[in-house]
Image (cartoon, rainbow, N blue to C red):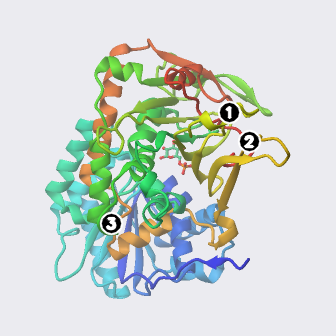
Amino acid sequence: MNKIPANVAPPAGPCCLVIFGASGDLTHRLLVPALYNLAAGGLLPDAFAIIGVARREMSNDAFRSDLAQALRRFAIRGIDERIIGRLLARATYVNGDADDPSTYERLDRELAQVERACATGGNRLFYLATSPSAFAPISRHLGRSSVAREEDGAWRRLIIEKPFGTDLASAQALNRELLGLLEEHQIYRIDHYLGKETVQNILVLRFANGLFEPIWNRDHIDHVQITVAETLTVGRRGRFYDATGALRDMVPNHLFQLFSLVAMEPPSRFEAHAVRSEKAEALDAVHVPSEADALRDSVRAQYVAARVGDNEVEDYRRTADVSPDSTTETYVALKLMIDNWRWAGVPFYLRTGKALKSKRTEVAIKFKQAPFAMFRDTPVDRLAQNFLVISIQPDECIGLQFSAKVPGPVIAISGVGMTFKYQDYFDAAPSTGYETLIYDCMIGDAILFQRADGVEAGWRVVQPFLDAWRGAGPNGLALYEAGSEGPNEADQLLARDGRRWRPIARPGAVS
Ligand code: BG6
């Protein structure tokens, strides 16, 4: 079969990208490879420049060779030295502390020079690839100076990484602060899950097909399972992770992106305002549980030592920079209900955890069982379950499970499946997921970014669980072995409702 090539787009318009945190991990691992891929795909404008800002003292040349090294290490495609050369020739460096006003004076001078030399038209994209504690100070300095002020037809945009706040109050405070300095249309809150093609495709699957939407409701859907399972341990991220935990790290952002795309009403237009309004609305409709209900409908757990394959994984509590009596969860499972007509009575079960048996991100929609009556007097003892499985990663596919007759003289039924695999149809070059996001920001399309209300709606759902857990202290923290399917308590969360999680580790992506 001839594969469908990735679609093409024109290069973005002239601009200068200013990266704060330019010597950090995110810049090295993801931003530079993504910029390279954009350059290789012809999506960067000729009038383009990069200014790196970080604390370390570095010459322009040292900065360029630092980026080149990062690229050689983290590129996800074969690299062409000519493209690297062209890309990095436009990179310069400003050193300074994020909270020091003189950094911004130097940046201002550098911008003036670069804009003259590269004809970037005054369009500026500020990327905050820093630790979250620097988000507010940088925004404050940018917002108060003229550096980020939109004037003379030039745009000024700010990409802000996660975590956006650590609870509802801090997310609201950060939004208030940002919106006091910049306009909402200048702020691009990133969630890298929205850079994944398989995540973006949920919108298309639901709304570009006549097939699914008529049955996408409580009349036909029994429940929804959203799983983001990782085999990774906390590793060297102990300091960040122990203060954060699985709930904050994954749920209000990545899992809620999946959740809101599945639960939202059809937007009236494929554009940022309409799509983001419907997503926020879906989160807003989630039932806010009492403290007792939050404890009943959630499971938090921590991994303990086990041998996984050839490796010994140690207790989470023995991880470097993790408190030896930490009660931080490395696994969370939640049951959420949505108070609206489409979803009343349909549970959404969400789970995510580290050090699990398999890496798997999927949305599984379980349809209601067909009535069994017709088969009562036959050898058939049960019907197969109908699941629509949207597999996000590492397998990129969508599968549908249904019942089929087993060939032969007597009636017998077996579960079978149909699977669509992206790789069978599409010929897309590998990407980091950041390419689309950076490109979209350059062209001013915010559809894949979070709006203030969406972020706050997510924290509003999570907050009762955070409060209830804080109240419960160490009580209720479950344990699971590294390399397992997760804690038994998570199984009980569904067993209570007569349901079961789909196994995380299984032979097929959508089996
Ligand atoms: C990050 C979290 O936002 O997402 C990490 O901080 C997590 O803890 C990662 O591992 C998962 O992203 P992905 O794309 O690998 O599923």
Mark 1 is on which residue type? Arg
Say whether disc 2 or disc 3 marks the residue closer to the N-terminus.
2
Above or below — where is 424 with respect to 196?
Answer: below
Give the SS element for disc 3: loop
Q: Disc 2, disc 1: CB below 8 Å?
A: yes
Quick check: can you spot residue 167? no
Q: Is residue 467 left or right of residue 256?
A: left
Point 77% across, 41% down: residue? 411
Task: Return the residue at label 1.
Answer: 382
Query: Which x, y percent locates residue 179?
Result: 17, 55
Instruction: Work out whether residue 146 or residue 127 is closer to the camera in this orientation and state it.
Output: 127
Task: Return the residue at label 2.
Answer: 413
Is the C terminus in the top left, top right, bottom left or bottom right quadrant?
A: top right
Quick check: can you spot residue 71? yes
Q: CA distance from mark 2 to mark 1?
A: 8 Å
How many dots with numbers? 3
Q: Estimate how packed mark 1 is, as few (under 14), some (14 to 19) or many (20 or more) residues with alpha carbons within 10 Å.
A: few
Task: Return the residue at label 3.
Answer: 446
Mark 3 is on which residue type? Ala
Point 74% across, 41% down: residue? 413
Q: Estimate how packed mark 2 is, as few (under 14), some (14 to 19) or many (20 or more) residues with alpha carbons within 10 Å.
A: some
Give the SS element for disc 1: loop
Instruction: Work out whether residue 337 or residue 370 is closer to the camera in this orientation and state it.
Output: 370
Give the SS element for disc 2: strand
Is the N terminus in the top left, top right, bottom left or bottom right quadrant?
A: bottom right
Mark 2 is on which residue type? Ile
Among the 4 quarters of the image, the one containing residue 507: top right
Query: Which x, y percent locates residue 120?
Result: 33, 83
Q: Please name which of the two marks, 3 or 1, marks the residue nearer to the observer.
A: 1
Say whether disc 3 or disc 1 marks the residue closer to the N-terminus.
1
Point 62% across, 67% down: residue? 430
Among the 4 quarters of the image, the one containing residue 15: bottom left
